[in-house]
Image (cartoon, rainbow, N blue to C red):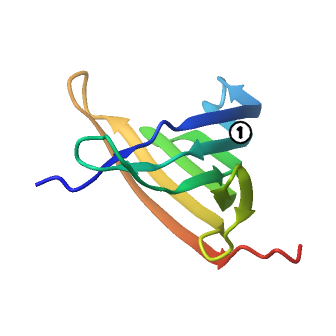
Amino acid sequence: MIDSILISNNVGDSGNSQLQYNLNYRFDDPVKERSLNIDLDYGDFNNDNFTIQPNSYFNANETQLLSINNNNLDTPTDIDIYTFKLDWEQKLGAGKLGLGTKLSRVVSDNTFLFYNVFDENATLNIQRSNVFDYDENVYAGYVSYSGSINQSWSYVAGLRAEQTDAIGILKPFDTSK
């Protein structure tokens, strides 16, 4: 049996920007059969979201308004991604030796602001608001060797190591800032 019905016509206003940059250097030496490739990347991602969430509770027939609980949500996000990648390949014996490394860093700042709305006046609810900060560093390296046995068969052997250091901190929203 239904005892109440929630009607909520949410309205949202959002905007985002995404910027990505790449700097690349490539060196090829066909005589010595070797190459070097270096990539530097940066990405900046920003989202601004504001939501108006009116919550009206009615009886099962929707003829009587039982209660109203209106909220606003302000949830901006800022993410920065930095990446460095280096790859080296060189002929060695009957095959090709490959070496490389990749370093990356992700920094993310996320804010969740929750507002109670009474008579069109919004009041920050610090018990329901928070800030989440995330920081990640990835360190990776590899070595590989590849070659051909004949026209039908080839091989690749390699080893990759990776370490990730990540920390996420969720904390209550601080109104003293």
Q: Is residue 152 above or below residue 78?
A: above
Q: Residue 91 location in percent, x, y?
A: 54, 38
Amino acid of disc 1: Asp
Q: Residue 48 location in percent, x, y?
A: 71, 42
Which residue has dot 1 on it?
39
Residue located at (59% from left, 51% from top):
100
Tell me the quadrant of the picture where the C terminus can be found. bottom right
Q: Quadrant of residue 49?
A: top right
Tell me the quadrant of the picture where the N terminus can be found. bottom left
Residue 8 as seen in the image, left or right of residue 58: right
Q: Residue 54 location in percent, x, y?
A: 53, 46
43 or 70: nearer the viewer: 70
146 or 38: nearer the viewer: 38
Point out the residue furthest to the left here.
1
Residue located at (58% from left, 40% from top):
89
Q: Quadrant of residue 63?
A: top left
SS class of the residue under badge 1? strand
Q: Residue 33 location in percent, x, y?
A: 60, 30
Point out the residue furthest to the front here.
64
Residue 111 as seen in the image, left or right of residue 96: right
99 or 118: nearer the viewer: 118
